[in-house]
Image (cartoon, rainbow, N blue to C red):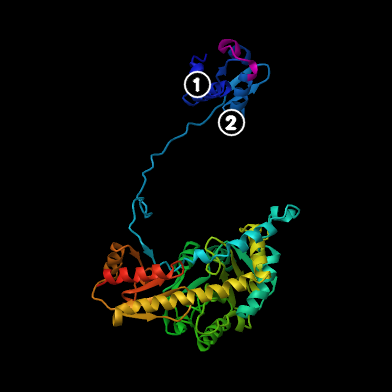
């Protein structure tokens, strides 16, 4: 019988009884097939109601610890012994908690938080969150909300020359999500040729999905075509409008060469990641590679993370007609990974012209910041060379120094500045010509912070 001093425990009586009996069964004090006291007998012994005992026993029955046999009573179930494994916790690469002296972070992936259209977004949320529209509570088809897909058809055609209809558009939860979806559509038998250096998350996504990775060098016109010529069953991942991280733009001649490569053999595709094509400051944005593709070889991928905010985890992918059958076969029973409410908000943001207004505002803002950063970097004189085109929200600098890249990062960190070495974006060894080349992002920094960051870098590197 239970001898636990129940009155000292603040938990409900039924729970105390349940916990005691469970512990007795787990410790094998009650063995399999043993009979436990009847509800009436235990209620009399503990001076509690039968209802209290019944609640405790019902919980034990629901969890499979005991079983009730009519006209016989309650018996302990036969439960395998749980074997505990001692797990050694290994040290991770996550930064340890503690005081950081970071003052300026030249992150190439962040945005200007103060310029986000908070008021407009709040109003759009209110207008889209309609209690009479029950569709916002339902699961959305895998390809995403039709409202957003229709808006993207018109927007992408007018801004990037993309030719498609809503059937070809797939909404994803960020670029990596879109690339994972694409990986399954292509199958892991498809090799992925990547620009080298490359957007590292794309590289890791395809690698984790089991694809053979083929790093391809880049020259001043973008990805080289010659190393591709003998490849079959391959998808070539490129960022032609503003190569990440080198910042070069692919001219029309190289684009046609790449398309011709894809056209010569079935099973060849081009993945065009148009991640920040909206931000070009001297000339108009270049037309997309997809806009000149006449044979359905280009898979177009874009995102709102750079143009609106990283937390808006919405990306979009335009699949060639030839791949739609594969997509439907795999995803026809799935739902969208993205909240229907967020999709409706973005759709309305585009439809009402607010997205275009926001882009115009951000172009002007980032162009101004870029100019300010270049002006401040003049303090280095001939020791710094600025690489890449006037686009995006980061620039590339090459530093003339006898110190190693590792040392330069360390010196910068000691002065509270974080910079991003280009070596992190290479697959394999970095080419010698890129030594001491760094990405400096200016999206999230104001002019005062940019000036302070450059001054700190000058002190750290001199």
Q: Is residue 278 magenta?
A: no
Residue contact between numbered discs 2 and 1, judged by CB atoms under 8 Å: no
Image quarter in which the C terminus is found: bottom left
Q: Which residue is mark 2?
A: 63
Distance from label 2 to label 1 (Cα)?
23 Å
Using the image as rendered, state which of residue 104 and residue 136 is in the foreground: 104
Q: Based on the displayed image, in which of its 4 quarters is residue 285 positioned?
A: bottom right
Q: Is residue 231 above or below residue 69?
A: below
Residue 27 % position (x, y): 46, 25
What predominant SS class does the magenta segment belong to?
A: helix
Residue 452 relative to residue 325: left or right: left
Q: Is residue 46 magenta?
A: yes
Identify the residue at the far front of this view: 448
Instruction: Magenta stretch: give its range.
Output: 43-51
Residue 140 showing in the rendered view: no
Q: Is residue 67 above or below residue 185?
A: above
The residue tagged with tag 2: helix, strand or loop?
loop
Residue 264 showing in the rendered view: yes
Q: Based on the displayed image, in which of its 4 quarters is residue 412 positioned?
A: bottom left
Q: Which mark is residue 404?
A: none
Q: Is residue 87 above or below residue 77?
A: below
Q: Which residue is mark 1?
A: 9
First along the sequence among labels 2 and 1: 1
Binning the other alpha carbons within 10 Å of mark 2 as few (below 14), some (14 to 19) or many (20 upward) gives few
Residue 188 relative to residue 448: left or right: right
Q: Based on the displayed image, in which of its 4 quarters is residue 337 positioned?
A: bottom right
Binning the other alpha carbons within 10 Å of mark 1 as few (below 14), some (14 to 19) or many (20 upward) gives few
């Amino acid at each position: 019988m239970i001898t636990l001093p129940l009155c000292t425990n603040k938990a409900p009586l039924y729970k105390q009884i349940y916990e005691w009996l469970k512990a007795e069964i787990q410790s094998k004090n009650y063995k399999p097939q043993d009979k436990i006291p009847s509800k009436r007998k235990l209620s009399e012994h503990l001076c509690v109601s039968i209802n209290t005992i019944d609640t405790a026993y019902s919980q034990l029955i629901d969890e499979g610890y005991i079983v009730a046999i009519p006209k016989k009573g309650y018996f302990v179930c036969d439960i395998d012994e749980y074997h505990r494994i001692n797990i050694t916790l290994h040290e991770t690469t996550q930064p340890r908690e503690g005081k950081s002296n970071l003052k300026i972070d030249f992150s190439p992936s962040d945005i200007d938080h103060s310029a986000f259209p908070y008021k407009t977004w709040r109003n759009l949320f209110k207008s889209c969150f309609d209690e009479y529209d029950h569709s916002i509570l339902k699961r959305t088809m895998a390809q995403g909300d039709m409202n957003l897909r229709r808006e993207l058809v018109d927007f992408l055609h007018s801004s990037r020359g993309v030719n498609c209809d809503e059937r070809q558009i797939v909404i994803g939860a960020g670029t990596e999500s879109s690339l994972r979806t694409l990986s399954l559509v292509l199958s892991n038998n498809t090799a992925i040729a990547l620009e080298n250096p490359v957007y590292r998350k794309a590289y890791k996504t395809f690698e984790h999905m089991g694809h053979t990775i083929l790093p391809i060098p880049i020259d001043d016109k973008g990805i080289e075509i010659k190393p591709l010529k003998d490849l079959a069953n391959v998808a070539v991942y490129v960022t032609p409008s503003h190569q990440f991280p080198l910042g070069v733009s692919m001219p029309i001649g190289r684009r046609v060469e790449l398309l011709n490569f894809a056209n010569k053999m079935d099973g060849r595709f081009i993945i065009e990641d148009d991640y920040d094509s909206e931000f070009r400051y001297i000339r108009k944005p270049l037309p997309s590679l997809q806009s000149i593709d006449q044979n359905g070889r280009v898979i177009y991928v874009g995102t709102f993370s750079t143009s609106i905010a990283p937390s808006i985890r919405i990306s979009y992918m335009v699949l060639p007609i030839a791949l739609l059958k594969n997509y439907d076969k795999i995803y026809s029973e799935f739902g969208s990974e993205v909240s229907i409410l967020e999709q409706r908000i973005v759709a309305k943001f585009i439809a009402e012209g607010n997205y275009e207004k926001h882009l115009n505002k951000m172009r002007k803002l980032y162009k101004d910041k870029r100019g300010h950063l270049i002006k401040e970097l003049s303090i280095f004189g001939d020791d710094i060379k600025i690489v890449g085109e006037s686009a995006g929200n980061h620039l590339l600098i090459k530093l003339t120094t006898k110190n190693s890249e590792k040392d330069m990062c360390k010196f910068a960190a000691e002065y509270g500045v974080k910079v991003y070495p280009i070596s992190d974006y290479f697959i394999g060894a970095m080419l010698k010509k890129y030594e001491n080349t760094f990405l400096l992002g200016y999206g999230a920094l104001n002019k005062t912070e940019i000036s302070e960051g450059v001054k700190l870098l000058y002190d750290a590197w001199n």
